[in-house]
Image (cartoon, rainbow, N blue to C red):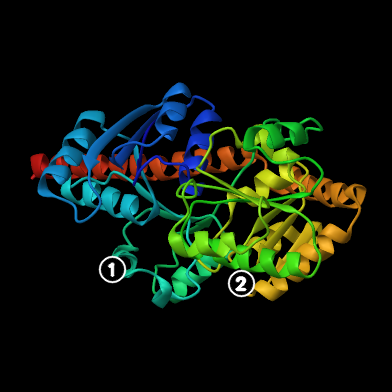
Amino acid sequence: MKILHVITGLNVGGAENMLAKLIENDSRSQTQHVLSLLKPGPLAERITAAGATVHTLGMKRGLPTIGAARRLMRLVKKLGPDVLHGWMYHGNLAVTYAQFASRSDMPTIWNIRHSLENAQRETLRTRALLAISRRLSHRPRAIVYNSTASAAQHEVHGFSTAQRTVIPNGFDCSLFRPDPGAREKVEALFGIPAGRPIIGCIARFHPMKGHANLVAAATIAMQQGSDFHLLMVGHGLAEPPDDLRKMIEKLPSGRVTTSDARLDVAEWLPGLDILVVPSGWGEAFPNVIGEAFSCGVPVISTDVGDSRAIVGPAGEIVPPEDPEALAAAIARMLELSGEERSRLGLAGRERIVDNYSLNAITEHYERLYREVSSNRANRTANANRGEHSVGNSNTLS
């Protein structure tokens, strides 16, 4: 079976990371191709190393061009995939266009990785994509959501309900695992002085990710006596934008470290004392919660997407965009002993192993590919039998 995945780009992000993990864990029953609409980012090398072929349309951000559409169709015609699998809104619309323009019954799958608490908070471009997607949502053979919250929110927004399939994110607990020596790695790698608990946030810079909310909460917590070092890692954070930088400068000197996105997260994540997910909206199933729990790191998360169900009793859930509540949760968790925090983190690891193993999630996707391609084969066989029957009838007449 040949699968063509279509995704906006291959920078470090939740959807891109899940696609890479899926390909790395493939049972090799499929031939995997990945098409990046934009110039491929750093995850292209990882995906290629896993055995997939990476293609690109070389598009620039903005409206699609006729040239890009032609390149897409040439690639689809050349590869002849059994399944077209779109990732995120742009990728979903691209595979729908390819299926329609090729005038074939090539099965398409949409993959939605975004929650939709309030569409009015999305950019005009995203709202336009949502409006188009809503009208076309009856076309894919399956719509995969990575959280039940996301599925329900999109369906309230008008997305077709018939194709709903919820497949949560999966995690390799042999790669992300507790490591007693990781604390020294974190301190050395980021130049963090020893002696203070380290609270981490791993997310690209975007207003919905809530970095300002976290810095505001850290300011409150430190003013109230909590002693810790804040580490924020993600694309766009090597040089934080001016408004966030000004907030950081109000914190005590030497208590905050920011860094660009990294591909070695599994090596140092176990060295954190607490992982915070401060998102305000948009999250469906934050990958980093599963990664932190797999490493035995306790989590504080805002109540977005399926975060409450993932965290359960192994961490704390606070309202989004409420720095006072987040500061109080940070203070409570820092008041626990290291052993108590470790027990919380290991309870989180058990939740991931039991409910979100990468092998189980990969098998779910592979089963879905077989189902949609089998349905196509059955329709083709039925059509051929119908043509044969009509032919016989004409001959007899």
Residue 263 rendering spot, x and y as whole percentages: 54, 34
**Classed neighbour count for the residue bearing mark 2: other residues with Cα under 10 Å, few (<14), some (14–19), many (≥20):** some
Identify the residue at the far front of this view.
Answer: 253
Mark before the other along the chain sequence, 2 or 1: 1
User: Can the viewer see residue 210?
Assistant: no
Q: Amino acid at mark 2?
A: Pro
Question: Left or right of 127: which side holds 336?
Answer: right
Foreground tag (2 vs 1): 2
Which residue does the numbered mark 1 point to in the structure image?
128
Q: Nearer the viewer, residue 259 or 346?
A: 259
Secondary element at image label 2: loop
Residue 20 spot, x, y in % from top left: 49, 35
Frontmost residue, 253 versus 311: 253
Along the viewing direction, whichever of 233 and 160 lies nearer the viewer: 233
Let me know if residue 246 appears in the view: yes
Q: Is residue 309 left or right of residue 49?
A: right
Task: State which quadrant residue 310 falls in.
Answer: bottom right
Q: Tag on residue 169?
A: none
- Position of 328 compared to 65: left or right? right
Residue 357 screen position, x and y as percent: 67, 41
Q: Which mark is residue 320?
A: 2
Residue 381: image x %, image y %? 31, 39
Position of 36 relative to 90 (above/below): above
Q: Residue 148 lies in what quarter of the image?
A: bottom right
Quarter of the C terminus within the rendering: top left
